Amino acid sequence: MIKKLQSLFGSFKQYKIDDTRKLSLDIILSNSSNRHSLEDRIEWLQQLFKWILADSYYQHTNKVPVVKIKFFLLLLDRNEIWKKNVCTLLQKTLLELSAIEFFCELGLPSQIGFIGEFGDKLMDKVLPRKPIGNQLGELLLNLFPEKQDTLWIASIDEVTLDKIFELFTEDNKIHFPHLLNDIEESLIYLVSQIVAIGLSPLIRKRIPHSKMTSLPFFSLSSHLDLYLKTKKQVAIDSSILNLELETAAYCELNILIGEAGKAVKEVYFHLDKFGVSIHLVYQLERLQYYLHRTIALLEINQSNIIPKKQIVLLTAELINQSLTQRSIKSLISGNVNLLFQKIVERTSKTGEHYIAQNSHEYWLMLRSALGGGLITSFTVYLKNLILLLPVTKFIIGSLGSLNYAGSFLLIQFSGFTLGTKQPASTASALAQKLELLERVEQVENVTDEIVMISRTQFVAVLGNLLAVIPAVLFINICYHFFVQKWIVDLHSAEHNLHSTDLFGPAIIYATFTGFLLWLSSVVSGWAENWFAFNNLHYLLSNNKKCKLILSKSGAVKLANFLENNISGIVANISLGFLLGLFPELLNFIGIPLHVLHVTLSTGAIAASIPSLGVGIFETALFWRSIIGLAAVGFINIFVSFSFAFFVAVRAKKISSIKRRLIYRSVMKRFLSRPASFFIPRN
């Protein structure tokens, strides 16, 4: 066993030595004559490019590989034998390689759905890399493994390109008919994919055309077939008539592809108006990739003179696309970003209602928050009652979720406010304002917006706390008057006090709660996007069952009600279950996280004071808990706002320059007028 391990280690060590060993160029060129099989020739190419790229990554410059290529070509010009051997090797290799996969698959999505593509990329990270075989695409990816390789490839000058192409020249002609056939087959494949995606119901129904036959995708295949036939006819008989027919067919095909691109833009316009889905965005991304690749291949196929620079640029682009496509991060950001944009937009509309623009709205927010705190006081005691039930943790979590969700819904439909639900929505609204920031003069306007958000958030939380504390005490005193005991027993009261102890895990729990507050806003934004994307307003208002049960006007009222309130309903229900059931599920799998919500925790401590007695005010624990409670409130709001603002900024692609301008302006405003962040001036 030990000998086998030693042998394995020795083989691995030798592999590392062989892999990192650098051969001199003269040795590489001397070995070019004895390469007979395709595998040997590919190995020789790998050695050559290892020499070309040897110092480029270390020096972080694109000039090194180009200089080395020029030196390589200079040596070949001075040694005819080497040049002949290299030409023969390159020409044989290119003849035996298939370029179909290179032209129509490299850098393009390989699956019909987002989940399948994600799985493919995940497996690509885990499984061993495919062998090169006879695929030109795999060879190029092996020779150019880094994205920076595409930069120096694209920077090769015309003179050097001419000398490189000379290596593939035979009898003063670059003659590789199989490459032209591969391009034509690739075009057929690409156009078939474009037609299939473009005529799919998901795309077709979002383009304002009355008939399928009026769509540009419908006749794309027939136009391509006509173009390829005229191209072959010109190869047989290059008469003026045939050349004119070929040119006309090429122009019509290009016009049709341009119209297909416009149709894709129409679908994107529809998404901006009616909502998005990840699957639809993925299909649009695929469609755009296929259209772009088709245009590039058509230009090369139509050229009478080989467009050397164009071929090199296309090669660099395909390698770059392939390396990008292999990235899981790029897949997620490319397809999910648009969905998050819509979520941010819809959440920001809700957030605008949570910003008090003047003193009148400020005091209205205080009154609304007082009502929210009053309802929360009943939630506190109902939670305490649920904890006393002799049932499993799952049932307690489920009942707690219903308690929270019911309370939040009651607050919503009563027109009241729960302060901790605001940050995620107001952050999205702020990001919308930042997106419109174009001039330095507008920085002050955005700063004003931040000040208004800050004091609105302050008064909302303050109103909740000012109402919940006396309401909880009043209910407890009334209960004691009739029953002669306090609602919260001594053990529960001590637990409530310890839960917000500044020296305990309160900060961690408050951070976790802030994350859940943000997550509920994401769910609500997604729900509103889903409602719009599936056109549920139209479906509900025209549904026969709804009309039969509710009458026609009732069905319309239901559709209008859900359209205006779906975001709030989903936000409240999701937040209720996130606060009540989710922590119990985490505890079940061994993650001991609990919820600390500033309003609920304040109510719980207020309910505990009568049970603990007035002597509790003299203890250090009580005051640590009060300070911890203030920290919990700040962290709830800060974490929720930060998550929402981070996502909104990324979704809206707001530059770091804009963000820095705002940060400086806000700090300057706070140092000069700190009170304005809490109380309006008039």
Image (cartoon, grey):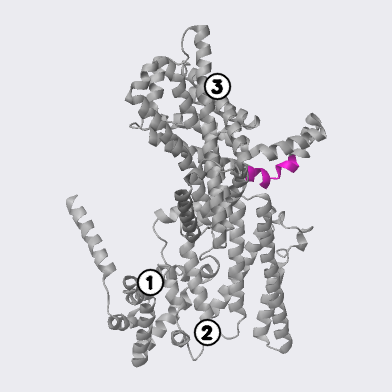
| Magenta stretch holds residue 529 | yes
Q: Nearer the viewer, residue 133 or 404?
A: 404
Q: Give amino acid for label 3.
A: Phe
Task: Determine the residue located farthest toward the front in the rendered image.
Answer: 682
Going from the N terminus, do you reach mark 1 or mark 3 first?
A: 1
Query: Whole-percent x and y of residue 299?
Result: 61, 77
Q: Which residue is mark 1?
A: 39
Q: Residue at x 38, y 72 (%)?
A: 39
Quadrant of the image occupied by residue 246: bottom right
Query: Whole-percent x and y of residue 29?
Result: 32, 83
Q: Residues within 10 Å of mark 1 (few under 14, many from 20)?
A: some
User: Please, is residue 626 above or below residue 664 in the view?
Assistant: above
Q: Give amino acid for label 1.
A: Glu
Going from the N terminus, do you reach mark 3 or mark 2 first?
A: 2
Task: Specify whether residue 89 is in view.
Answer: yes
User: What element does badge 3 sit on?
Assistant: helix
Mark 1 and mark 3: span between their CA atoms? 77 Å
User: What element does badge 2 sit on?
Assistant: loop
Magenta-drawn segment: 528-539
| Magenta stretch holds residue 555 | no
Going from the N terminus, do you reach mark 1 or mark 2 first?
A: 1
Q: Which residue is mark 3?
A: 378
Q: Which mark is residue 284?
A: none
Q: Residue at x 46, y 88 (%)?
A: 159
Q: Give amino acid for label 2.
A: His
Q: Which residue is mark 2?
A: 175
Q: Nearer the viewer, residue 124 or 597?
A: 597
Query: Whole-percent x and y of residue 382?
Result: 53, 20
